[in-house]
Structure formats: structure tokens, C-alpha cells
Amino acid sequence: MSKCKYVFVTGGVTSSLGKGIISASLAKLLQTRGYRVTIQKFDPYLNVDPGTMNPYEHGECYVTDDGAETDLDLGHYERFLNVPTSQANNVTTGRVYSTVIDNEREGKYLGKTVQIIPHVTDEIQRRMMILGESGDYDIVITELGGTVGDIESLPYVESVRQLKRKLGSDDSIVIHLTLIPYLAAAGELKTKPTQHSVQKLLEAGVQPDILVCRTEHKLTSEVRKKISLFCNVNQNAVIESIDVDTIYEVPLVMEREKLDRVVLSKLRLPSNQDANLDKWKRFLFRLEHPKTEVNIGLVGKYVELQDAYKSISEAFIHAGAENECKVNVTNIHSENINDDNVKERLKGLDGVLVAPGFGDRGIEGKITTIKYLRENDIPFFGICLGMQCAVIEFARNKLGLKGAHSTEMVKKSRHPVIDLMESQKDITLKGGTMRLGAYRCKLAKGSKSHQAYGKIMISERHRHRYEFNNAYLKDIEAAGLKAVGVNPDNKLVEVVEIPEHPFFVGVQYHPELKSTVDEPHPLFVRFIKAAMDESKKHKR
């Protein structure tokens, strides 16, 4: 195919309708039809990226192989498509304005007055086209963050208007995701919010080609006709997106509604190859028909917000389906754990994952948790700070190094078993300055991690500043905590294990970021398998 096609996905009425899931589901359907598809997200906030945001503000920060700190929707894109994303797949208003201002300072606008139109909208359009012009994709789906009508979203909607005019109706379409609320008192679905949302788009000069309607009740033919008439879209382009039990059902719902067929028709693309979701359906069957179940504790300090550990939650779903096991996750706030209640807090759990994070809040609860898991042979999986806490706990309680800590928490620790990387010591800026993106790791032959991956050399994504202090490596290994994964280039410790323990694995990287429906992450799969073995002990 010589020319890339563009699909723009906007949202109206309210936020959190699931533009990312609809975009990922459409992309999956088109991918199984043989098209090369990618998705990009344009976020309307002024942060350059979400890297400096508190997880309570924006959920988790998703990291790509090339080190981009991005919106969590990119995680959905990768989990559905099983294709890596990159810096180009997530753009923020902050990044756009930063580029425009840099260009002005360099004199690239030849003394012109710099304005939203054309300078900001031109930069937005340039970034919208980057992936399409690479030659790697047949279709680029662009999700616009925010809600139509927001001041922040106006430059993006205007950019889409201009771009659609340049590209033409055969090469670009707009899908508008909206809400059809049900009023129980009246016993009716109400289309007026959707009409007003489309009207907002029309005021900005954009006519949607397809409406995807989130609803709790099925759309009747009369409701579809009404939406079609008042919103000026074909009736077959009014797509029902009814609530489902899991996001992984959405591609099947969109296939039943023929969303992919309507998109291909409007883009004048052949649909001679049917969507093949057989593998997806097998995953869903295992997910919905487990043969057993386990209880997993997730110990962290952001547990109040569901999206703070989104990729971890999804990785549990993938690993559970792979093991034909239902994974019941109990969120436990690390601030609420201490020596007196740890046994009660962890009672009935078959395994515990100690989550990543920053700062000293709740740190002692994590360390107390790990000590209990280590001493009682309960499966433990530590990620990033979770791995560092395992090293601190081991140094304190097995090596007798009182005061052992991370210099992130205690600047002048007596025993800094976790310390700031040399390359980080002179950095004062917070944004985009951590060790980010994919790095290699060499695993020790025969280790649990090696057995899980099935290979010696792996590559995983990182997001951190502090590392295992190799000055303590010899003593810690001699006491029984083995460094079984090491970066071959800088010799930094990536994975620690206790070989005699049923499952005691801590990793400096973020394995959850590479778990997908097609390829569940091997460490999560092995952790759930170890939890299943632990569960069997309870039942004896």
C-alpha cells in the first residue's frame, strides 16, 4: 500500500469513556485483517510528559523501549497489538509548545508573530503525520485525549479539521466516542448529550464519520435512527459499545458491530480478509473459565487508585489466563503494615507482589512484608523499589547491617546497599532524567528467572535512579541472596533471588510493561504458578 490512512478518535459528553480501549480494539481487528496498524495518543496537558506526575494524578507512567515516559493508554495499545510503541506514539501539549518556543528562539519563523494558528496547529499536524510518513504502517489511529468542548482540546480538533481537508475524505476519518445515558425514572436511553457533543464538533468544523456509543443498555433501531438523523451519520456508522465484564471483550463487541468493516469502507480499503480473533478468543475462554484460583497481595502506597498499577494488574490477568487460574488481587497499603500486624495482613495470601514507587512513605511496611515472606517461604515478587526493599531487608536481617537503607530515603545511610547511580549524581532536573527504556540483562544459568525466560540474554524496560550498590554484592551473595541477573555493559545488578526459597525474585526493571495478551510475561506466569503451588499446600 503506497499511502497511509488516518483515523482520528475523539471523545465527548464525559471523560473516561474508553477511547484508548476502542482505539486498541479497532487496531486489533484491522491488524488481524492483515493491515499494519499503530496508535498514537495526543494528550492536552501542559506537562512535557507524565514522568513527573504523581500516580494519583494520572495513573501509572508507561515506559517504552526507547525511554519515553508516556500515557498509560500506550500500555493498552501494546497489550492488544503485541507491537512496541515509541516516543512518537505519545505527544503532549507541553511537548508541542516546547518545540514551537524552541523554534521561535532559533528564528525558524522568520520574525513572524507566533500564534496557535498556524504555528501550534502545524506542529501538531507534523507530529500526527510522523508515523504515517515512516512507511511502516498502512493505518495510523490517533486518539485525542480530553473531551470535545474543553479549551485544552481545541488546538487538536482544529488540527484534525485542517488535516482532514488536506488528506481528503478517502484517506482520513473521525470516530467520535460518546455516551448514551439511561434514565431509570423515564425508562429511556437519552441521545441529547450525544447530539450536543456532535454539535460541539461541528462548531469546530469537524463532522464525525462514525459514532461509537457507550451504553449500559442495547441501542434499539429507533435510537440508532434518531442518532443517525440528528448527528448526520449513516445508520450503519452508529456503533453500540455496551458495557462488558473485561476490556478484552471489546474487540469481539466491535467485530459484532462491524466497526472495522465500516472503517475500511469509509477509507476505501479492501476487506477481503476477515478478522481472525481465534487466538484472542482462546485467551478469553481461559480467562473466563479458570480451573483454579489464587489470592495475591499487591503491597504498595498508591493502592487507592486503580490505574496506579495498571500494567501490573493486566499482567496478572495475562498470567492467570496462561495458567488457567483466576487471580484474586488484594490491594494492601504498605503504610498500614508493621511487625505487629503483618501476619494478619498477609493471612490467606498465596503470594505477594511488592510494587514499585518513589519516596520513603510506606517503605518500612514493604520491608516488613518481605521479611515475613522470606522467613515463611511464601512466594515473593519485587519490582523496582520492591526489589530494592528486598535487598535492604536482607542486609538488615541476614547480614546484621543495622541502618542499611537506600540513599533515596536516608542520604547518609550507614550502609547504603541501594545507592544513586554515578551518572545521576550531578542531575538536578526531574523530568526524563532517570535510567529509562530497554537495557540488556544476562541471567545466571539455572536460576528461576532463567528457567522462566528460557534464555540467558533478555531485554527489559527501566525507570529508576537508584541501584544495587555493588560494594555490598560479595557479602550479600555469601549470605544467600544471589544476583542472578546483571547488565553485561555496566555490571549493575538487575535480578536477585534466594535459590532455596519457593519463589523469591526481585527485579530492578519493570516486567509488567512487556506483558501482552499474546505473550504473557514469563516472570508473572512463573509467579502465579508458584502461588498455585502455595495454594495447594493450604488445601492439604
Image (cartoon, grey):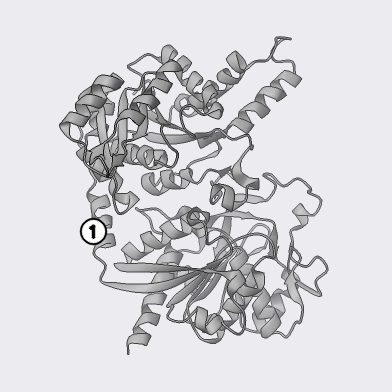
- Left or right of 51, for residue 126: left
Farthest residue in the front direction?
185
Residue 489 visible in the displayed image: yes
Task: Give the residue displayed 25% in from the left and 40% down from the top.
Answer: 186
Q: Please provide percent x and percent y for residue 340.
A: 60, 85
Task: Give the residue displayed 42% in from the left and 63% down from the top.
Answer: 522
What residue is pinned by disc 1? 285
Q: Secondary structure at mark 1?
A: helix
Q: Amino acid at mark 1?
A: Phe
Quadrant position of residue 132: top left
Task: Give the residue displayed 34% in from the left and 15% down from the top.
Answer: 169
Question: Which of 353 and 219 lies nearest the eye of the viewer?
Answer: 219
- Left or right of 295, for residue 111: right
Q: For the N terminus, give its image quadrant.
A: top left
Q: For the C terminus, give its image quadrant.
A: bottom left
Task: Give the residue displayed 59% in from the left and 14% down from the top.
Answer: 118
Q: Please provide percent x and percent y for residue 303.
A: 53, 62
Farthest residue in the bottom direction?
540
